[in-house]
Image (tube, helix red, strand yellow):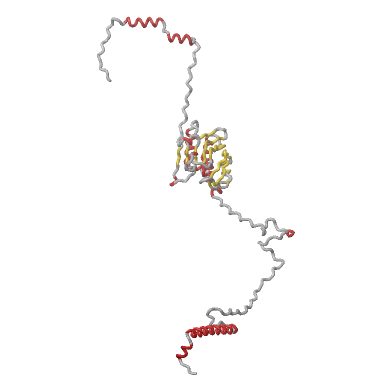
Amino acid sequence: MGFSVPDFRRKWSCRGYMSAGAAMVTAALGLSLVLAERAEARKYTSPLDIFGIAAPRPRPAVHSARIPLPRPRPEEAPKASGEAPPEPDGKPLADKPGADKPAEAAAPPEKPVSACRLALTEEIAIAPSIPDIRGPGACGGEDLVRLEAIVLPDKRKVTVKPAAILRCTMASAIADWLRKDMAPLATSLGSTIGELDNFDSFECRGRNRVAGALLSEHGKANALDVRGIKMANGQSISLTDRTISREVREQVLHSVCSRFSTVLGPGSDWYHEDHVHLDLVQRRNDYRICQWNVWDPLPQIAPLLPAERPEEAPPREVAAKSEIRPEKGAEDEATEKPAANVGKSQPHKPATKKRR
């Protein structure tokens, strides 16, 4: 049987070449699987496992190291500080949080005490602290006190009626004013201070109670309106009373204007004609306002009364008739005077031109 290339090409078509190639690929894949199994048996990774289809390599056995354990706690050892006390009769404590009772939230940290609060002791004023006020808008403030009384250097107390709600700095300024300025003034008048007349302190409002106006310092607990000071002997010093000595009112004016940044009294506007406004508002360059006119005292005018009627005076009816009708002798004298002048030459007066 003869064999030649042309006969081979005529006998086998292209399909034969393709089927032969597919058979060769299949054989190569089978060989790789066999080699992979043998490599797994030798615990080596197959070099032909490019697709990662071989079984994973088993890990070698890990020998656990022996870890030394702590020695047991002796029975006579003291208990730890964080160890909870034993529960009596096996019952859980009431305040101990359990699975069904969540632990209480931690309390907020306490607010630090201000330097003003530390300085304003009971030897200076009776002024207990009150919580901060958060009102509508910018009303309210922090570090507030309720000024109930002021303790003078001689340990006497000046009651503030009614008690004023102020910032600590404002309350401290009022206490210094009474202790250092007004107490010596009262002593010069022969008495001591007994009471401070508080007209207004904290109130969330606009200036002069005008709707839509800027927030007053009263709304920030930084102002006090004072009408007067009552003495221990019953005498009262009204700061706007014109019957009080002008010298006394001027001393009060100089004392408040040197301590407070705003002083409004009579003459500033008609809102402050019967009291004096004091506050500690902070302005640029420490600018201050002191508007208080100390008016002169009212003149003492005696009432105009008619003089007393003398006892020897005639009755009122007779006196009235005599004033209306002249006496007869007076009438004759009036008629004789023109006749006596008849025939006498009158002096000639030169004519003068009348000015217009």
**Can see residue 214?**
yes
Q: Is residue 255 left or right of residue 37?
A: left
Q: Nearer the viewer, residue 37 or 44?
A: 37
**Can see residue 158?**
no
11 versus 288 height, above or below: below
41 versus 114 height, above or below: below
Q: Total number of numbered labels?
A: 0
Residue at x 67%, y 63% (from the top left corner)? 80
Instruction: Look at the image and tell me in which quarter the C terminus lies.
Output: top left
Residue at x 70%, y 66% (from the top left corner)? 77
Q: Is residue 230 left or right of residue 352?
A: right
Name the spot of residue 328 as percent of width and height, x first.
41, 4
Name the spot of residue 69 as percent of width and height, x first.
66, 72
Name the spot of residue 301 as percent of width and height, x first.
47, 25
Q: Nearer the viewer, residue 347 or 134?
A: 134
Name the spot of residue 140 as percent of width and height, x first.
53, 45
In the image, farthest residue toward the right: 89
Q: Nearer the viewer, residue 143 or 21?
A: 21
